[in-house]
Amino acid sequence: MRTDRLFLLFGAIGGFLTVALGAFGAHALKSILSPGLLQTFHTGVDYQGLHSLALLATGLLIRERETASLRFAGWAFASGILIFSGSLYLLAMTDARWLGAVTPIGGTAFLLGWGALAWGIARSK
């Protein structure tokens, strides 16, 4: 599968899951989780939604002109969603506090993705 289509697909699936998980958190988890853990879950949803949109934008930019920095940005966003949001979802559901040490790895992936996206845009002709 072409890189642009892959990132567009990841972004679309990520957007779908953002809505589904947001609704799940607001309805099913509201009475189960403590307010703090529910907020942790929703932070994962918020970052997943934002970076799903970033994946869509990256996929569209790659359609225009594929570069290594744009490919890197897309993979960094996808990895960040999995690691950052995924660790927050697991933390909220299990209260396994050690997962909080994993979350910054995903945050770093997000930062690298935004940096690579900016670099790719700045260097485009």
Image (tube, grey):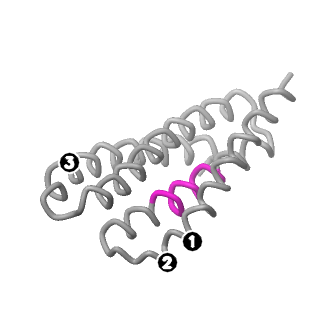
* Residue drawn at (58%, 32%) of the image: 57
Image position, residue 14 (x, y; %):
42, 47
Q: Quadrant of the C terminus?
A: top right
User: What's the residue at 66%, 32% (across, down)?
Assistant: 63
Tell me how far mark 1 sits from mark 3, CA to CA: 25 Å
Is residue 50 shown above or below 124?
A: below
Q: Judge left or right: residue 23 versus residue 90.
A: left
Please report contact status of discs 1 and 2: CB closer than 8 Å, yes or no: yes
Residue 59 is inside the magenta segment: no
Dot in front, 1 or 3: 1
Single out the residue that lies furthest toward the top: 125
Residue 54: quarter of image: top right
Neighbourhood count class around disc 2 (C-alpha, 10 Å): few under 14, some 14–19, many 20 upward: few
The residue pinned by badge 2 equals 98
Instruction: Tell me the mark number nearer the camera, choosing from 3 and 2.
Output: 2
- Can you tell which mark lies on residue 26? 3
Disc tally is: 3
Q: Residue at x 37, y 63 (%)?
A: 89
Q: CA distance from mark 1 to mark 2?
A: 6 Å
Quadrant in the rendering for residue 106: bottom right
Q: Hey, what amino acid is under mark 1?
A: Ala
- Please tell me the numbered disc located at residue 101: 1
Q: Position of residue 24 (x, y in %)?
A: 21, 53
The span shown in magenta is: 75-85
Residue 56 image position (x, y, % from top left): 53, 36
| In the depicted structure, whether residue 94 falls above or below residue 88 | below
Q: Residues within 10 Å of mark 3 (few under 14, many from 20)?
A: some
Q: Residue at x 33, y 52 (%)?
A: 39
Judged from the image, the secondary structure of the residue bearing numbered disc 3 is: helix
- Which quarter of the figure has residue 108? bottom right
Classify mark 2: helix, strand or loop.
helix
